[in-house]
Image (cartoon, rainbow, N blue to C red):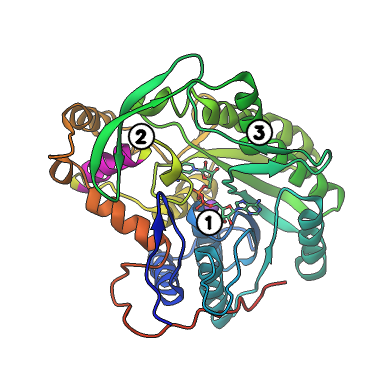
């Protein structure tokens, strides 16, 4: 069928299989051009189908020649109805990985559940024995606690005060004021439940008990800090509390991995257009100003550039892993450079609906957004019939 984007707010209801495949191939090509890294050979990625998790899987497979297992939660296709993009991304990734002689299998289901953890552990035992890198890259608006069955919703709210600032509707380019009421204590607790470190630690507990974590293994989860303008709603808001919890979980996991000589890290990544970040108020406007500034300075990176650099210059150098004073890996270093932030905050003050397309990279934001769903990819013929019924070759 002919597949076109159908957007509703910050989501797109359709995805293009050929476009998603082309997008994945671009990322694979990037890694191949950068060259090999001497890294781990058996890698589990939780949240492997889009964004930073997909980039983590691609960089491991094509950068380390690693066998990869990917876990994600994606909608499969039905006749006349497209799958979600992570489905098509994974189908394309596995096809390319298999063609390159690499092991790649996937599990589609709720990573927060005991069942999917067990299924993953069984697959590792059967095929790989153990893994030596575990990437934790989930982004979800809700989580059901497997022990109690209670479902928690995360929120994106400031704490203790109303948040008022600019935001943009990136479809229309309209810059307007947004006002967000402060979170309740329950909102804070719920957001920590969903996006904090509890589930990461559960994965490590259960994998360790099952003996599927190798000696000297690393596990890495992703965090964000960002600029002053988003601080009240992001880092000092409900999601920031969850990230604080995630970062604090490092100490707990390190204790548990001690006897295996394993280590855990949080990597603070750059703000980028993903399905998760387009849902956050204010972030799209910030990102379009950031893109403009970083592209002008030749510092722009997408998910694949970020994660390749994480592996090459942080995790798998010959020496120690470089971290900040709080023990975190920083690949948001270029985003938070003083000269970058000085320009962005100057632009922030000046930005209006009328001048945004000139001051900011709204076009780049939009293109990245549509690319997430396989649209607006150069070289793809969108007028041609596309088969929506694509299989993931290594799906378990
Ligand atoms: P994303 O939305 O692109 O990816 C989320 C992944 O989680 C997908 O693979 C999805 O299938 C999977 N997932 C969601 N719910 C699941 C469930 N219940 N069971 C199994 N899989 C599930 O998000 P993105 O942006 O790549 O986020 C990943 C991490 O990176 C998050 O912790 C996020 O906070 C962090 N991060 C994101 C930044 C950004 O600007 N996008 C910046 C810095 C950190
Ligand atoms: Na991800």
Q: Residues within 10 Å of mark 2 (few under 14, many from 20)?
A: many
Q: Is residue 14 above or below residue 294?
A: below
- Which residue corresponds to the image point at 75% horizontal and 67% vertical from the top-left? 128
| Residue picked out by circle 1 | 56
Of pointers 3 and 1, the one earlier in the residue sequence: 1
| In the image: residue 167, left or right of residue 363 | right
Residue position marked by numbered label 3 in the rendering: 250
Earlier in the chain: of badge 3 and badge 2, it is 3
Give above or below for 298 relative to 251. Answer: below
Label 3 and label 2: CA atoms lie apart by: 29 Å
Please indicate whether residue 140 sits to the left or right of residue 254 in the image: left
Asked where in the image residue 205 lies, by quadrant, the reply is top right
- Residue under label 2, please give it: 282
Q: Quadrant of residue 76?
A: bottom right
Residue drawn at x 43%, y 38% as measured from the top left: 280
* Residue 63 visible (yes or no): no
- Labels 2 and 1: the sequence-earlier one: 1
Give the number of the mark in front: 3 or 2: 2
Residue 67 lies in the magenta stretch:
no
Q: Is residue 160 above or below residue 9?
A: above
Dot 1 crowding, Cα within 10 Å, few <14, some 14–19, many 20+: many
């Amino acid at each position: 069928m002919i597949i076109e984007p159908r957007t509703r707010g910050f989501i797109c209801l359709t995805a293009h299989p050929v476009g998603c495949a082309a997008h994945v191939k671009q990322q694979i090509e990037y890694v191949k051009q950068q060259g090999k890294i001497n890294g781990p050979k058996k890698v589990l990625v939780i949240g492997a189908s889009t964004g930073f998790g997909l980039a983590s899987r691609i960089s491991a497979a094509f950068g380390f020649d690693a066998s990869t297992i990917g876990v994600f939660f994606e909608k499969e296709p039905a006749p006349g109805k497209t799958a979600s993009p992570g489905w098509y991304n994974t189908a394309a990734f596995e096809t390319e990985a298999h063609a390159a002689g690499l092991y790649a299998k996937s599990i589609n289901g709720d990573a927060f559940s005991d069942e999917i953890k067990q299924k993953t552990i069984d697959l590792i035992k059967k095929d790989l024995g153990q893994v030596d890198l575990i990437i934790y890259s989930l982004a979800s608006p809700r989580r059901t606690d497997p022990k109690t069955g209670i479902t928690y919703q995360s929120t994106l709210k400031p704490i203790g005060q109303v948040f008022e600032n600019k935001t943009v509707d990136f479809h229309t380019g309209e810059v307007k004021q947004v006002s967000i009421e402060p979170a309740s204590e329950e909102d804070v607790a719920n957001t920590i439940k969903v996006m904090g470190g509890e589930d990461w630690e559960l994965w490590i507990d259960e994998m360790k008990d099952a003996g599927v974590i190798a000696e000297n293994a690393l596990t890495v989860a992703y965090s964000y800090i960002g600029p002053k303008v988003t601080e009240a709603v992001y880092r000092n808001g409900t999601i920031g509390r969850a990230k604080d919890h995630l970062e604090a979980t490092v100490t707990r996991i390190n204790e548990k991995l001690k006897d295996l000589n394993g280590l855990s890290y949080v990597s603070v990544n750059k703000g980028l257009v993903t399905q998760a970040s387009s849902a956050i108020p204010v972030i799209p406007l910030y990102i379009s100003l950031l893109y403009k500034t970083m592209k002008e300075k030749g510092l722009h990176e997408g998910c694949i550039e970020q994660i390749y650099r994480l592996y090459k210059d942080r995790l798998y150098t010959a020496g120690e892993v470089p971290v900040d004073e709080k023990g975190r890996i920083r690949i948001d270093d270029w985003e938070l450079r003083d000269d970058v932030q000085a320009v962005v905050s100057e632009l922030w003050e000046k930005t209006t609906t009328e001048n945004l397309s000139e001051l900011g990279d709204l076009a780049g934001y939009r293109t990245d957004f549509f690319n997430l769903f396989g649209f607006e990819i150069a070289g793809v013929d969108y007028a041609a019939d596309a088969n929506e019924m694509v299989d993931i070759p290594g799906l378990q």
